Amino acid sequence: MTKKEEPPLSRVPRAVRVASLLSEGEELSGDDLGDEDEDDPAYEGLPNSGWHAGSLSLRLLSSPPGPELLPHPMDGLPRGPTPRTPVIKAGWLDKNPPQGSYIYQKRWVRLDADYLQYFDSSKDAYSKRFVSVACISRVAAIGEQKFEVITNNRTFAFRAESDVERKEWMQALQQAVAEQRARARLSGVRGPEPPDHAGSLELRGFKSKLHVTVAGDRVQLYKNLEEYHLGIGITFIDMSVGNVKDADRRGFDLTTPYRIFSFSAESELEKEQWLEAMQGAIAEALSTLEVAERIWAAAPNRLCADCGAAQPDWASINLCVVICKCCAGEHRGLGAGISKVRSLKMDRKVWTETLIELFLQLGNAAGNRFWAANVPPSEALQPSSSPGARRRHLEAKYREGKYRRYHPLFGNQEELDKALCAAVTTSDLAETQALLGCGAGVGCFSGDPEASTPLALAEQAGQTLQMEFLRNNRTTEVPRLDSTKALEKHYSVVLPTVSHCGFLYKTASAGKVLQDRRAREEFSRRWCVLSDGVLSYYENERTVTPNGEIRASEIVCLAVPPPDTHGFEHTFEVYTEGERLYLFGLESADLAREWVKCIAKAFVPPLAEELLARDFQRLGRLPYKAGLSLQRAQEGWFSLAGSELHAIFPEGSREEPLQLRKLQELSIQGDGENQVLVLVERRRTLYIQGERRLDFTGWLGAIQKAAASSGDTLSEQQLGDSDIPVIVYRCVDYITQCGLTSEGIYRKCGQTSKTQRLLESLRQDARSVHLKEGEQHVDDVSSALKRFLRDLPDGLFTRAQRLTWLEASEIEDEEKKIAKYRELLAYLPPVNRATVKALISHLYCVQCFSDTNQMNTHNLAIVFGPTLFQTDGQDYKAGRVVEDLIGHYVVVFSVDEEELRKQREEITAIVKMRVAGAASGTQHAGDFICTVYLEEKKAETEQHVKIPASMTAEELTLEILDRRNVGVREKDYWTCFEVNEKEEAERPLHFAEKVLPILHGLGTDSCLVVKRHQSMEAMLLYLASRVGDTKHGMMKFREDRSLLGLGLPSGGFHDRYFILNSSCLRLYKEVRNQRPWSGAPETSHRPEKEWPVKSLKVYLGVKKKLRPPTCWGFTVVHETEKHEKQQWYLCCDTQMELREWFATFLFVQHDGLVWPSEPSRVSRAVPEARLGSVSLIPLRGSENEMRRSVAAFTADPLSLLRNV
Ligand SMILES: [Zn+2]
């Protein structure tokens, strides 16, 4: 290794000036950058380009320092920028040799908070190598005073002079690494910021190209891109001393006082880009100096306004004073309402020309003439004053205004305001400062409607400096002597601009939703300041540089977990766009609420401000689709308060909050990456998209929780459509479907453990519990319902009214008693009233089956009296109320005929389908999912539909057509067919038929297919043209005896005579006197068979195995009262015949209404009405179909719904 001769200092122009720009301990050196590499013997290091004094064209050097630039007499130090990061440790160490060599090399090693660097000598400006502290994974001792610095994939070994020396180095390194990690955790920033410009450049004398980055005010040299990613570089060049110059075609020079770097770019174009980037870095480097230098141009600004320390590089922009770092920390502690602290060097954007000018005019001179007019020598600060003394002094000076020069008008608000209005129109800034500091109102009314505020007056007068000063003091608090209590209270009043500060306890930010409790120890106390749309957190209230910041504009969600979720009683979470989650904690509920309010105000736009009016658990913005804007997702503002989800949509009308406990559907669609939360309320559907994983997951959990029961009272339960708790509905529905005929239903007890488990899951999320026959015994379900009702904290009849109900049962006059019940019923809360009605209606049904279940009204009353009134069973009155309510169900609850009839039909259907569908295995209480095919049964035509109890065949048909986007044309008689493959027969369902009972009766051989009813037109024509409503005629008949279980051959088809009228179908073996078609044929014999027409199911088709004599046959199924199935086959001679018979069947079975009138179809086609009741996505089916649908849904959830 060669060492270049050091240039004599005298040859360097203004050498002293230049030297002062160096970091401490450094002197000017013309030394090489290095010529070694520990890993690559071929690496030659930086060449000896030497010192070219003649090519220096440093801007700083070119202008002779003016008088203000001379060191201030008080400085005692050469002026210049303080090093960006102080050196933690520096010294000589032996570095392990490169491969193949045994000689240790002496290196000057220097460690600061960010880098470990080593140099050839202590005088070198540019390192041979630097290692980013962030990339150091471990520091370990190895033998003989040696230690290793281990990075991801490289190890640097050093040898110290002594063990003590080694220990010091290792400790310093380990501490630097630990602090670096802590900083990274706090700030949530990973890795270095992306450079402004980067790429490969040739450096003269180098074999291989270097990877060079321009970041901020630095140019950094790396051997290659890989090393850049590893955080290991050669050196970095501070551009505050740099200058760039175009050399030749692709070449350019970066000149510094210590070295000239001659680069060559790939192309001329690239060279231009490099020049621009490096010039930008120089501008940036100089601008940081520029502000300080310009402000220091006024001599008083060169000493801290408070303690007199030299080179103050901080300022309070509202007080308009320049202060040192120590005082700046204390200023920060006063709160932004007193002092707005900014750095002269770092807060570049703050320093506008106007503000700098203001500091030159006011600054420390004017500031202290006012604020420090009367400082007793004993209370004055020194640069060496203790933090405590500093704090006391600054509190007194700025918060209390203790030392200020009192304005003659002090105490006379009106006069002060008037004087302020006058002053701001002049250039007398000191007067304005004095007036504001003595209590003049910065926002006072000037009396001039044209320019109503001092700011407006200043503007009118063209006083830009006055304007700047007023603006910076818009939120400044007037000093008050009585504000001593505020010493403890480290937060200021909430101001319109939202600023807030105080201590918060903070955990390291997280990348996922917090699942478990964060212990108190995991929180660190931080001084937090919310100001100018930034929430900054500091080590303590005196620190000037924040540990980290959260920009309000990046906050996407603010959540308030329930008290005591974590080690701190009160906590709140802040979610950012960058998918980080910050958890803050406080002891005091009030302080926590205040913080939440302020942060919310800081990030919620005015349009969504009303969301702040409520106490929310969660607030933020989310992409959504809803209402009329379904085409594309938009960002909306949401808040979750209790079980209500409030939403503010940028477009569209005011929305009612969604009642989460009353949702019909709450589901997550899509896969891990593209999740959509679907919320279906009765008449609207909301899709919330999981664009950002972190806050979406948080919302999901919170919404699911809010949609669940929040407590044990009735109204806190998940509620169904008619305000009946889902838990009650689920049980009642299940008993209705499976337990009406169960002996001793509600009297028998279920298994305690099963009942308990069931009730627990129902309480947790009743909506998701689907009771299935075979899995749940009816007695377990009935016991769970009874237990739920008995355990209701307030009881079904409420504590307040319970006695009145019991008393009412003693009224002797039956009519008066009923009237009293009705009156009391009206007093019940809505949810209780709805539940009482639903329950009594159910018990009314139960007692209808008392023949089989043995539970008559009286027995039910004995069971339910004590349960509902929560009595011990001794009080007979409770039972009597229940007995009365069941007995007078129709009157008490004003149940009309129609309602009652429907109820009976429903029960009949349920009982029927229980028998019919016992084997189907698909039934469970609640929602039924059915597979329906379009046109024919095959995988591609499958659709899965949720079938509500009320759904008719027509509704189902239209549903399928809608989904498949099939337009309904005139004379397309789309009908839902029940197709029985085994019987080779199909039955077009009547449009008004309820689907659910049919679904229950479907065997495994049957399915539902929606297709055109080809004969419907002909049938309608026939029905319209015929006379009378009966039909007679010969048909070929065959009885299926196999169903009787005899296994006998059933013989062939035989001619039989049939008569079909409005009540029954009759079969005659022989026709005696067949008369003309004028009336009933004269038959002397009784019919051989007779069936009630309404209980017949007529299927088109006869299975071929039976060898039907014609292809115009149909199958008739009759179910007896004892639920025995009988089956016959009938064949006609012509298709016309068949249609006529079939049409007549339809006609008589459905009272003449064979096809719906048009209007019913039209009204059905309103999309809005469907959104709520439709299953949005197939919930069962082939995997492919599911996948396809999910994919389609994810791409556009509406596509499944839109086809109207
Ligand atoms: Zn100071």
Image (cartoon, rainbow, N blue to C red):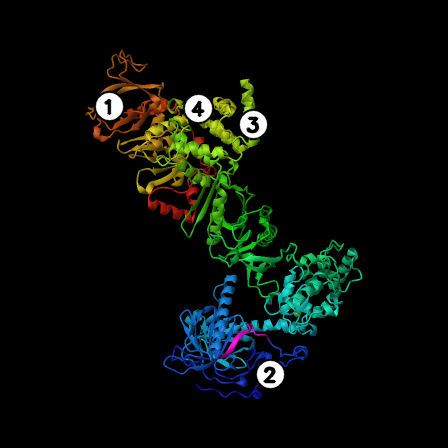
Start-end of magenta stretch:
81-92
Residue denoted by label 4: 859
Would you call the spot at circle 1 few (<14 residues within 10 Å), some (14-19), or many (20 or more)? some
- Tell me whether circle 4 and circle 1 mark residues in contact (CB < 8 Å): no
Residue denoted by label 1: 1039
The amino acid at mark 4 is Asn
Q: Residue furthest right?
A: 408
Residue denoted by label 2: 16
Q: Is the residue marked 4 within 8 Å of ligand 1, measured from its CB?
A: no
Residue 447 lies, with reference to residue 1014, above or below; the image says below
**Dot 4: what SS?**
helix
Is residue 967 in view from this perspective?
A: no
Q: How far across and how far down the image is residue 297, in percent? A: 67, 74
The amino acid at mark 3 is Leu
Q: How far across and how far down the image is residue 232, in percent? A: 45, 72
Q: CA distance from mark 4 to mark 3?
A: 22 Å
| Side (left or right) of 350 relative to 1041 | right
- Return the residue nearer the eye: 149 or 632: 149
- Return the residue nearer the eye: 352 or 848: 848
Residue denoted by label 3: 803
